[in-house]
Image: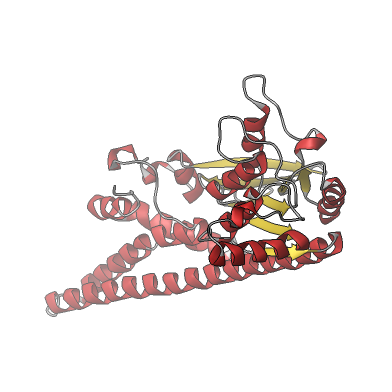
Amino acid sequence: MAIPRVFISSTCYDLKHIRENLKYFVKTIGYEPVLSDDGDVYYSVDKNTHDACLTEVSTCQLFILIIGGRYGGEHQNKEGSITNNEYREAVKNKTPIFALVESAVYSDHHTYLSNKKTNPTFYEKITYSSIDNIKIFGFIDEVRKNSLNNAIVSFNDFSDIESYLKKQWAGMMYDLLAERTRNGNAKITNRLIDDLTIAAKKSEELIKVLLRTTNTEQIEVEDKISKIELIAKARSFPNLVETLFNSRYFSMLDLEEFPDPTEHNYWYDFLIATNDFVITKDVEDGIKTYYLHDNSKTHIELGPELDSKKDDPWFREIQSAFEALKQVDLDIRISILEEMIILF
C-alpha cells in the first residue's frame, strides 16, 4: 500500500535531536520520513548532492520545514542555502508545507523587522544572538510572504512541533473528506441537471410527434414514443460515464478513432477499446477482484468476475444506456459520441 512520504528540511547539526524526533513521529503516524542525513536521498552519480536533495523533494507528498539559528551551507550554483532551495522546490511542486521556527529566532525576527523599519541604515549590522546569519530572517520573510501555504509558527521544543503537526494533519484529513462529500454532492446535482435536460428534450420531441401524428394510428404513435425513449436512454450514457469516472471525455481527437459500440457486448468492453481505460486483476488470499481504471487513476471495482455486478442497479443502468446507444440510428449515435470528444 502506498503511503505519504514526508521530506524533513532543516540544517542538520544544530537541529539533530529535532530531526530524530520528527523521524520517529512521522513513522508512528504510518508515513515515510525522508531525511538527507539518514541515507534516504539517492545521490545520483550524474548530479551534485545538493541537486539530488531537490529531486527527492519532488517525490514527497508532505514537506516539514524547521528553521533554526544556523543558516547552513550555500547551495551550489543556486542562490540561497540548501534548505532555502529545498523549500522553493516544495513551493514549485505545490507540496503542502508545514513551517516552524525556533521561538528565539522568531522573537529576534520581530526585533529585526522593527530595526529594519526604524533604523534602515544599520539594521543589517546588528548582531542577533539567536542566529549565525541575518539571511535567516530574509528566509522567514520569504515563507511568510508566499501567496499560498505561508503559515509559519514558532516552537520551544519538540512537543510543540508534534502538537502542531497532529492538528494540521487532522485538519488536512478533514478537508479531504469534506471535499469528497462536496464532489459527491456536485455529481448528484450535475446528474439531476443532465436528467432534466434529457427529459426536456424527450418532452419536446414527444410533443412534436403528437402534433404530427394526430391523424395516424395509435400504434405508430407508440412506436415513435418508444424511439424517443430509446434516444433519451442512449443520451444518458456520457452522463453515467462521468458519474463513475469524473469525466465523460476521451483523449481521442477524432470520431473516426472511436471503436464501434455495436461491436461490444458490455459498456466496459467499449471503454477499454478506446484505450483510455484498462482492467486490472488483484489476487488476495486466493480471491481475485477485477478493477476498471481510467487514465486519471480513478477506478471502480467490477468484482470477482467481469460481469459479477451485472445485477447491481448502477451496472444495469449504464448497461441499459449502452444497449440503447447501440440501437439508435447512426446519426444519433454519432452525435452522442461527439459529446465525449475533448475539443481543443
The image shows residue 125, relative to residue 174, as above or below, that is above
141 or 94: which is nearer to us?
141
Query: Residue at position x 54%, y 41% from top?
Result: 278
108 or 214: which is nearer to us?
108
| Circle count | 0
The image shows residue 340, relative to residue 181, as above or below, that is above
Observer able to see residue 310? no
The image shows residue 265, relative to residue 105, as above or below, that is above
Which residue appears farthest toward the top when viewing the image? 45
> Does residue 128 appear left or right of residue 142 in this picture?
right
Query: Residue at position x 71%, y 62% from top?
Result: 108
> Does residue 261 appear left or right of residue 156 in this picture?
left
Residue 160: where, in percent of width, then height? Answer: 82, 65
- Would you identify the image quadrant in which residue 215 lies? bottom left
156 or 23: which is nearer to us?
156
Residue 45: where, in percent of width, then height? Answer: 67, 19
Residue 10: where, in percent of width, then height? Answer: 73, 46
310 or 289: which is nearer to us?
289
Q: How is the image coloured?
A: secondary structure
Query: Residue at position x 48%, y 58% from top?
Result: 246
Observer able to see residue 168? yes
Residue 17: where, in percent of width, then height? Answer: 87, 49
